[in-house]
Image (cartoon, rainbow, N blue to C red):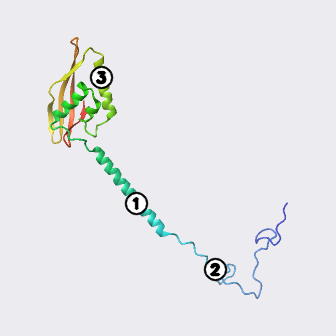
Amino acid sequence: MTQPPIGGAAGSPGGPAHQEPTAGATPAPGDPATPGYPPHPQPAAPKKRRGLLIASIVLAAAVLLCGGGGTAAFLTLRQAEDGQGAKEPTVAVDGFLTAVYKDRDARAAATFVCSASRDDEKIAAKVAEVRKYAGQYQNARFRWTTPKVDNQTGDRATVSTRVTMTTADEKTADQELRFTVVRKTGWWVCEVA
């Protein structure tokens, strides 16, 4: 067992207890034990650096605004159409069909698709599907009826056509297709049903 230090701290065992002022002693001003005197003023807390706080807030707001503006600009430009688009809705559909069914070129097909629907992987998958389907038959060829505008309102049109595949052994298969085409910087295919 350890011994308390000699002359220990106030309130510790062996240390001096709180002592009442002795009679005739002048109490120290501000002594909390001395009634009638205000307590000693506490040392002032270090001043907060308001300038640094305000500068930090302004900097964070500037980063958010610039970042938000940059993001908005990126998204806006990303949605912008590359190139001119087709002069007519039927020309866009015909160009798309040529790229997919005759040339079997996904990159060329993408040049006829609106930016909102342009998904290079899906377009490439569709072209690969057509290539695989045609590969199952001897000398498969595709043709289609002249695309026809069924409905056009402002910058939106519905175009339909029938795609026919014929083979060397005279087998045929038909498929009716309906395209939604929109006008931005020209006409673009946005949906095929």
User: Horizontally, is 65 left or right of 160 in the view?
Assistant: right
Residue at image position (33%, 28%) is 125
Give SS at disc 1. helix
The Cα–Cα distance between marks 1 and 3, rounded to whole angstroms, is 53 Å
Please identify, in this view, whether the residue under mark 2 or under mark 1 is nearer the observer: 1
Type of amino acid under label 1: Ala
Q: Which residue is mark 1?
A: 61
**From what the image shows, is residue 53 above or below residue 113?**
below
Q: In the displayed structure, does residue 21 sit left or right of residue 114?
A: right
**Camera-nearest label, 1 or 3:** 3
Labels 2 and 1: the sequence-earlier one: 2
Residue 72 drawn at (x, y percent) = 32, 51
- Residue at numbered disc 2: 40
Q: Amino acid at mark 3?
A: Arg
Q: Position of residue 126 (x, y in %)?
A: 30, 27
Label 2: which secondary element: loop
N-terminal label among 1 and 3: 1
Quadrant of the image containing the C terminus:
top left
Q: Quadrant of residue 21?
A: bottom right
- Seen in the picture, residue 41 relative to 69 is either above or below; the reply is below
- On screen, residue 108 versus residue 10, left or right, reads left
Indicate the secondary structure of the residue bearing disc 3.
Answer: helix
Residue type marked 2:
His
